[in-house]
């Protein structure tokens, strides 16, 4: 594991961060990651940060309004929605679908990690 992540309490997070950092130079699309190198978190936990807005690719960006879109993540229902604060619409296209998909996958990975941690502790 990358020593930079050794201090993280969430072992599954540390392992996934390490694996994705290693895979990125070999072709893993950074926007397909389930973890965030910048914030050292699961992507669903920090997708709301301004650093997750990418104007060029349309990630969290409403082109109609030139406005950063909000992402709402419901960790109970695993519902993820992207919406523009101006027009209220969800930006169409692959970028929005990718956000929903990766956030749901990161929630699943985090939940799986918690289950395994509980099993280890028992
Ligand atoms: Zn982040
Ligand atoms: Zn808009």
Image (tube, grey):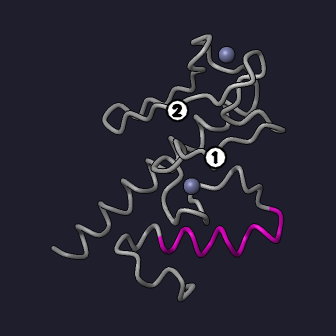
Label 1, secondary structure: give it: helix
> Marks 1 and 2, how far apart in space?
10 Å
The answer to whether residue 66 is above or below residue 53 is: above
Q: Is residue 103 left or right of residue 107?
A: right
Q: Looking at the image, in which quadrant does ligand 2 appear?
A: top right
Image quadrant containing the N terminus? bottom right
Horizontal side, residue 94 vs residue 56: left or right: left
For the point 59% across and 38% down, the residue is 101
Residue 103 at x, y percent in the picture: 53, 43
- Lateral position of residue 27 relative to residue 14, left or right: right
Sequence-first tag of 1 and 2: 1
Location of residue 65 in the rendering, given as x and y in whole percent from the top left corner: 72, 17
SS state under label 2: strand
The quarter of the image holding the C terminus is: bottom left
Instruction: Say the numbered circle drawn on residue 111.
Output: none
Q: Write down the residue under mark 1.
A: 52
Q: Residue at x 76, y 67 (%)?
A: 24
Q: Does the magenta stretch include residue 16?
A: yes
Name the residue tied to disc 2.
71
* Label pair 1/2, CB-CB below 8 angstroms: yes
- Snapshot quadrant of residue 22: bottom right
- Number of marks drawn: 2
Q: In this view, does 34 lie above or below 59?
A: below
Q: What stretch is highlighted in magenta?
A: 14-27
Q: Relative to 55, say whether 111 is above or below.
A: below
Judged by its main secondary structure, the magenta piece is helix
């Amino acid at each position: 594991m990358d020593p930079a992540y050794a201090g993280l309490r969430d072992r599954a997070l540390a392992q996934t961060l390490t694996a994705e950092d290693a895979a990125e130079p070999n072709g893993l699309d950074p926007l397909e990651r389930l973890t965030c190198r910048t914030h050292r978190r699961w992507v669903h936990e920090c997708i709301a940060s301004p650093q997750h807005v990418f104007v060029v690719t349309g990630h969290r960006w409403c082109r109609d309004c030139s406005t950063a879109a909000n992402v709402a993540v419901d960790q109970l229902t695993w519902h993820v929605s992207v919406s523009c604060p101006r027009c209220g619409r969800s930006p169409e296209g692959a970028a929005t679908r990718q956000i929903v998909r990766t956030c749901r996958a990161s929630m699943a990975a985090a939940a799986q990690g918690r289950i395994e941690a509980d099993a280890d502790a028992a």
